[in-house]
Image (spheres, helix red, strand yellow):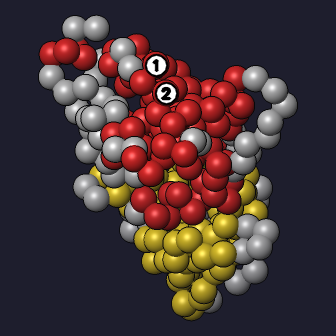
Amino acid sequence: MRISIRNNSSYIIDFDQLVVSGREAAGGYAFSFTLRGSRSACSAPVSIFDISLSLSLSDPVRPLLTAVPSSTQVVQCHSFANNSEQIHFECVLTKGQVNAIEDYRLEGDLKLNVGLRALTTSSDGLLTSFDVADVVVPREHWLNALKSAGFRQTLLFEVPLPSVSEELTGIISKAQEFIETGHYKDAVMQCRHIIEQIEKVRDDKNQSSAANTKAHSKERKDMSSIERLLSVREQLKNVCQLGAHGNEFFTRSQAKTVLAMTVALLAEPTVGFVYGEEYANE
């Protein structure tokens, strides 16, 4: 990448790297975008101020953030060069914005269209500088930023869950991580492991199978609500079976749906997570 700040057509600062990091924020996810590059020597003093960054998803270009101000108020340029110039920008994204980015990114790198705007003042007067460039944020760098921002600690849907074992929490986290990294079939397979853990704890695998058989018989009209939920759980497990065997292909949205259904269904204590010490002692 190359994105620059110019004064009267002369390049003053050239940036060739965009570094992204994340941290937790109240009500959203905070991200820092740092432009790194070098500053050229100026024959006459130049001041750079009112620096802002705009970010868009690229191909096609869809605006994400506009006019994010830099934490650097003023950059003074003199007769000597600087080989390690950097400027920081920080913003807070909502869950909806991050999910939109992930729907766009899928399992690959994050491709952004970056705009850099600034004002310069010198003997030539007050001038505007604007430049734009396409930037690729490597997948691993973006995933690390997401993790630092706390995105992996949030379930795909807001479902109240009881305190469960670390093993089960780890499986849920692994399923979400597989979705973020593009391993959708593996994410679905983790959902099957979650259901199997619940069957083991509740010791109701036979009841679930019987309920599913009843749901496909003439007796289905007489099924109780719990029997119907057990049948749904069994059907969901059968879908997850395709993640462990066969050549079935899952999309990102399908994997998200399976994980959301698994967590939402198992949040119901009559067919899912067991509250209290009974589960904790397993």
Q: Amino acid at mark 1?
A: Asn
**Residue neighbourhood size for the residue with mark 2, other residues' Cα within 10 Å, grouped as few (<14), some (14–19), many (≥20):** some
Instruction: Using residue 27 as the reference point, say whether residue 206 is left or right of it.
Output: right
30 relative to 131, above or below: above
Residue 139 is situated, as x and y percent measured from the top left of the image, at 67, 41
Q: Residue 160 is drawn in which quadrant?
A: top left
The quarter of the picture where the N terminus appears is bottom right
Q: List x then y, in percent, for residue 172.
A: 45, 30
What residue does disc 2 label? Answer: 210
Q: Quadrant of the C terminus?
A: top left
- On the picture, is 49 further left or further right than 166? right
Q: Could you tell me residue 200's position as x and y percent?
A: 40, 13
Q: Is residue 147 left or right of residue 3?
A: left
Residue at horizontal 60%, vertical 86%? 128
Work out whether residue 182 can be spotted.
yes
User: Which secondary structure lies at badge 2?
Assistant: helix
Examine the rendered structure and indicate whether residue 190 appears above or below residue 93: above
Mark number displayed over residue 96: none
Q: Position of residue 60 (x, y in %)?
A: 77, 73
Check if mark 2's residue and mark 1's residue have beta carbons within 8 Å.
yes
- Please name the residue that numbered disc 1 is placed on: 206
- 75 or 86, which lies in front? 86
Q: Nearer the viewer, residue 123 or 127?
A: 127
Q: Nearer the viewer, residue 81 or 48?
A: 48
Number of other residues with Cα within 10 Å of mark 1, as a class: few under 14, some 14 to 19, many 20 or more:
few
Q: Secondary structure at mark 1?
A: helix
Q: Is residue 199 above or below residue 42?
A: above
Say which residue appears at 38% left-offset and 20% top-offset. Answer: 204
Q: For this view, does 223 lie left or right of residue 188?
A: left
Q: Which amino acid lies under the numbered mark 2 shown in the image of this protein?
A: Ala
Marks 2 and 1, how far apart in space?
A: 6 Å
